[in-house]
Amino acid sequence: GDRFQLGEHVFRLVLEQRRADRIQTLIRTANQALDAGRYVEALDACEQVVLISPEDPDAAALMDRARKALDDQQVEQLIAEARTCINEGHLAEGGELARRALGIHPDHALANALLEEIGAIEREERERVPKERAVAPAIEKCRDAALAGDAEGVVAAAEQVLALDSVHPEARELMAEAPSLIEARAREREAERRAREAVDRARRDFQDGHHDDSIARLE
């Protein structure tokens, strides 16, 4: 009987040692996997430890670290995908990805910032459509005035456009060209005035019988 009890005791000791060795190996595997960024592998090793020793503190601590690292990795991926969607104009999809990230980390600053960015883009888009509708006839009037050489009309229409959209590139360009139009128009008027004066003098010379002088004035 004593020999049987001794044998049973030795068997239990061997079993306990094998169990401890297995746990140590799994914990070492979990640590190495965690350090290498293989978080799923680390979790798997920890779960095997828990099956052997449900209250093992090292396994519990490593599982917490692996789960947190997996969450951080998933959030990082969601944020990157959300940023790509926003850059490509897929705002609804980007917003959904950012909200999924917040479901994992509710206070994630970058996810919240992306949602704010999406909101700002959507507000700007809502404001842009009516603004473009209001700008369209004014910029058309500005173009027509420029084609007609009507500098005052260009300025008036461009001011109308810029009141609606202060950085409208075409309106700013036409406004910048207005002074040269004014100068050109002034030169045209001066040329027209001189031409009228020459015609008037020629007419008077002709009426006074100075036919040669009259013809010379018109040449």
Image: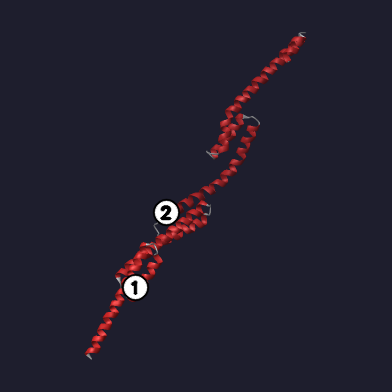
Q: Secondary structure at mark 2?
A: helix
The quadrant of the rendering that contains the C terminus is top right
- Residue located beneath label 1 in the image: 49
Q: Which residue appears at 57% of the width and 27% of the height?
A: 179
Q: Which residue is mark 2?
A: 110
Mark 2: amino acid: Leu
Tell me whether circle 2 and circle 1 mark residues in contact (CB < 8 Å): no
Q: Residue at x 30, y 68 (%)?
A: 58
Residue 116 versus residue 160: which sits nearer the camera? 116
Q: Nearer the viewer, residue 77 or 10?
A: 10
* 93 over 10 or under it: above or below: above
Q: Say above or below: 143 vs 92.
A: above
Residue at x 47% of width, y 51% of height? 117
Residue 33 seen in the figure: yes
Within 10 angstroms of label 2, few (less than 14), some, or many (20 or more) residues? Answer: some
Of the 4 image quadrants, the one containing the N terminus is bottom left
In the image, 127 versus 169, the foreground residue is: 169
Give the mark nearest the N terminus, 2 or 1: 1
Q: Residues within 10 Å of mark 1 (few under 14, many from 20)?
A: many
Q: Taking 87 as reference, is 7 left or right? A: left
Q: For mark 1, give the secondary structure.
A: helix
Q: Nearer the viewer, residue 141 or 82?
A: 82
x and y percentages locating residue 131 in the rendered image: 56, 44
Q: Percent position (x, y) of residue 45? A: 37, 70
